[in-house]
Amino acid sequence: MDTIAWQNNTLQRCSGIAPECDNYGTDCARRALAFHEGFPSYSPTPLAPLRGLATELGLGGVYVKDESHRFGLKAFKALGCSYAIGHELAHRLDLPEAGVNEITFAALCSPDVRRQLGTVTFVAATDGNHGLGVAWAAHELGHKAEIFMPAGSARVRVESIRALHARCTVTDKNYDDTVRIARDYAAERNAALIQDTAWPGYTDVPHRIMQGYTTLALEAMRQMNALGVDRPTHVFLQAGVGSFAGAMLAFFASTFQEQRPVAVIVEPHAANCLFRSFRAGDGQPHKVSGPMTTIMAGLACGEPCFLAWNILQAHADVALSCAESIAANGMRLLASPNPGDTPLTGGESGAVTAGALEYVMTRPCMKQLRARLGLNAHSHVLLICTEGNTNPEMYRPIVRYGHYACTD
């Protein structure tokens, strides 16, 4: 396959906004932000305007939301995990829906609530960052976590989860089969499954996880506004199961309606389920099975979340399927920026959108795609660096020694 393969979304809604998007709009984001602000370690992650890179690429602006600073965990995932766990605990307290939506960190940590709830065990499957977020949120709120990881998971990611007093088991299965193991484990023990993908009968938790992610989008919009930018014209979004991309795109569609940004979905070749779904063009999500070997561990997911799929098929513009070199080049691009730009630490999954943007803007073979997306000197492109250096054993050889170099 080419270094980057691209596919138009022929299913895209030409006018109007999918009704699902209103579940992730500004009002939702404000509630999620209010919840996250209650955590002692909360602060907005920075937004870096890369003016030198924008000039080099012939763009009006490039802005990178740096999630390597989120809650000290080096990744954004805890936003969704904590919000879903907060709502799960609120439901266990039998609060009315209004009370569930107004739940706070302080209330959940109060002695009275602790007595009512006892100790709850939260279960998740993960490639790393999601499980770390579940373990962190459970620990912060005084509960326990049991995390399952697929075969080949990085040792450092396992150790990071265990450092938060969670049990972590590495299976001999791929990610999607490991999700099924976690699901069965939770059901057998009456534990709370906190998974960021949905299936029939399991939608409330992934819905809350997606809502939790909108804190990031609201922060980014306020930061862009402070820089004098009304809205992004384009947004590049990583997709594993698609929950993050779906939540971000729903927020922008609900907020900006017909002025929503052009949305580009980015996946690795080895786990390009949304790319394949757009290419099939039949309105159904299509999965990737078997081993999904990629340095982009956080995106090594083969089965789309159907909650996200309903949003993505309506409002995403293009899907990119990317070689490993695109992620590696993005990591180097952020770590060693143009003069005057802020150096950023982007992990493999976090930096792939930067690598994709640079490749699309500089390669002659991407001319048709640039025209399709309308990327030009008037474009203001938002990228989210979803993770920092979560795997030093991978990060160092790529950034320092040029592993996975781009050859074209």
Image (tube, rainbow, N blue to C red):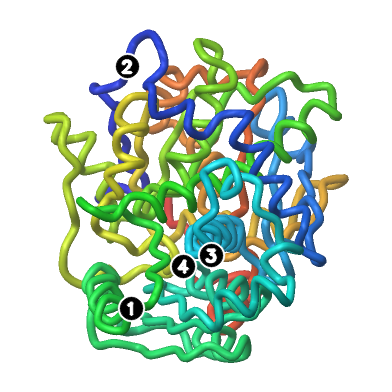
Q: Tell me which residue sits at (48%, 40%) in the image.
A: 247
Q: Against 295, is 254 above or below?
A: above
In primary-sequence order, the first of circles 2 and 3 is: 2
In primary-sequence order, the first of circles 1 and 2 is: 2
Can residue 322 be seen from the camera position used here? no
Q: Which residue is mark 2?
A: 13
Q: Marks 4 and 3: in contact by CB < 8 Å?
A: no
In primary-sequence order, the first of circles 3 and 4 is: 3
Amino acid on which the number 4 mark rests in the picture: Tyr
Q: Which residue is mark 3?
A: 89
Amino acid on which the number 3 mark rests in the picture: Leu
Q: Nearer the viewer, residue 275 or 135?
A: 135
Callout 4: few (<14), some (14-19), or many (20+) C-alpha neighbours within 10 Å? Answer: some
Q: Nearer the viewer, mark 4 or mark 2?
A: 2
Q: CA distance from mark 3 to mark 4?
A: 44 Å
Instruction: Give x and y (percent) for residue 106.
Output: 76, 63
Helix, strand or loop at label 2? It is: loop
Q: Which residue is mark 1?
A: 190
Helix, strand or loop at label 4? It is: loop
39 to the left or right of 272: right
In primary-sequence order, the first of circles 1 and 4 is: 1
Amino acid on which the number 1 mark rests in the picture: Asn
Callout 1: few (<14), some (14-19), or many (20+) C-alpha neighbours within 10 Å? Answer: few
Helix, strand or loop at label 1? It is: loop
Q: Tell me which residue sits at (34%, 56%) in the image.
A: 197
Q: Nearer the viewer, mark 1 or mark 2?
A: 1
